[in-house]
Image (cartoon, grey):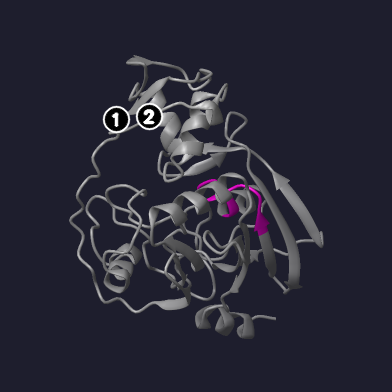
């Protein structure tokens, strides 16, 4: 349990703001959840997040005990782009699942990271995804950030929430796009027809994707893609919706292609973010994987 007595430094702050200021190792999302679950008491009474604190208020926070995880470190080769005491950035290979799920508790990026970082991973991600700040689909290759401590995790999560982390992708799509660049602004929600898929829906969450043509081929287009939002399967859904599905995508197209590629040809090539500790701007890049380059050499 955490607790503190409100002094004049917090006078008239909202309850959630006061807690975020006092306890910087708690994320805003976590604070809001604790308040909603009535695990934050002010003078022994639950209050709303909008409650204005007063000098002398006795605030108590009842946090859940961290769940023990039973994951095994595994020596899976990783392409580490950057590492320090706070973060590790990996160029994830295609086919590697980011975090364990029911029935798939090993052979993941988390298992590999645990072998490298030992006990120095954040626990905010929950029971089965320590250190994971954001994710990439199994068959999307490229850059992903892992937090080594809770402070770094909270900082990076806030950057994602505030759209301060800039992500750039490279994709090969079916069809020749006429526009040199365009923006797709279509809300995305879980499909009502197939709960394993996402779909464009007027009732969905805001989703914005920008793309620019790098090169046109006879039947394909190579794109640079930047996203403002990070909805599940966003790029894949948007490109399929406008009639240019990503090559190899078996979920949002038929997946058939002359190259025999299984899984989408989508690569997270660049990340720009602020380091959670030293506040320096990080500009990291990961080259296209060999299979991707080999296919680009074959097409005209």
Outermost residue on the top side: it is: 45
Dot 1 crowding, Cα within 10 Å, few <14, some 14–19, many 20+: some
Q: In which quadrant is the N terminus drawn?
A: top left
Q: Are marks 2 and 1 in contact (CB under 8 Å)?
A: yes
Q: Magenta span: helix, strand or loop, mainly?
A: loop
| In the depicted structure, whether residue 285 falls above or below residue 102 | below
Dot 2 crowding, Cα within 10 Å, few <14, some 14–19, many 20+: some
Residue range of the region highlighted in magenta in the rendering: 226-235
The alpha-carbon separation of the residues under discs 2 and 1 comes to: 8 Å
Q: Position of residue 149 (x, y in %)?
A: 38, 58
Q: Which mark is residue 183?
A: none
| In the depicted structure, whether residue 18 falls above or below residue 171 | above
Q: Is residue 98 left or right of residue 247?
A: left
Q: Position of residue 182 (x, y in %)?
A: 78, 54
Q: Residue at x 49, y 20 (%)?
A: 55
Q: Which mark is residue 62?
A: 1
Front residue (pair 52, 180)? 52
Residue on which disc 2 sits: 34
Quarter of the figure with residue 273: bottom right
- Label 1 sits on a secondary structure element that is loop
Q: Position of residue 160 (x, y in %)?
A: 56, 50
Quarter of the figure with residue 23: top left
67 falls in the magenta region: no
């Amino acid at each position: 349990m955490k607790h503190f007595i409100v002094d004049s430094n917090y006078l008239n702050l909202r309850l959630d703001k006061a807690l975020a200021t006092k306890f910087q190792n708690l994320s805003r999302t976590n604070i809001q959840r604790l308040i909603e679950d009535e695990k934050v008491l002010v003078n022994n009474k639950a209050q709303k997040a909008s409650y204005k604190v007063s000098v002398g208020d006795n605030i108590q926070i009842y946090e859940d005990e961290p769940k023990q995880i039973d994951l095994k470190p595994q020596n899976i080769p990783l392409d580490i782009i950057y590492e320090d005491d706070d973060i590790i950035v990996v160029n994830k290979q295609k086919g590697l699942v980011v975090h364990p799920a029911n029935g798939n508790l090993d052979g993941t990026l988390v298992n590999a990271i645990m072998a490298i970082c030992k006990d120095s991973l954040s626990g905010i991600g929950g029971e089965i995804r320590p250190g994971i700040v954001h994710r990439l689909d199994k068959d999307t290759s490229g850059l992903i950030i892992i937090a080594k401590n809770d402070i770094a995790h909270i900082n990076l999560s806030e950057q994602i929430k505030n759209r301060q982390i800039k992500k750039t992708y490279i994709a090969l799509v079916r069809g020749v796009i006429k526009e040199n660049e365009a923006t797709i602004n279509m809300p995305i929600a879980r499909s009502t027809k197939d709960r394993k898929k996402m779909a464009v829906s007027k009732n969905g969450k805001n989703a914005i994707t920008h793309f620019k043509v790098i090169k046109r081929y006879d039947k394909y287009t190579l794109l640079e893609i930047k996203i403002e939002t990070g909805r599940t399967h966003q790029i894949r859904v948007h490109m399929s919706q406008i009639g240019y599905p990503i090559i190899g995508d078996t979920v949002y197209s038929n997946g058939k292609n002359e190259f025999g590629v299984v899984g989408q040809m989508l690569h997270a090539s660049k990340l720009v973010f602020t380091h959670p500790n030293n506040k320096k701007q990080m500009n990291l890049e990961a080259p296209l994987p060999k299979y991707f380059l080999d296919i680009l050499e074959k097409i005209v």
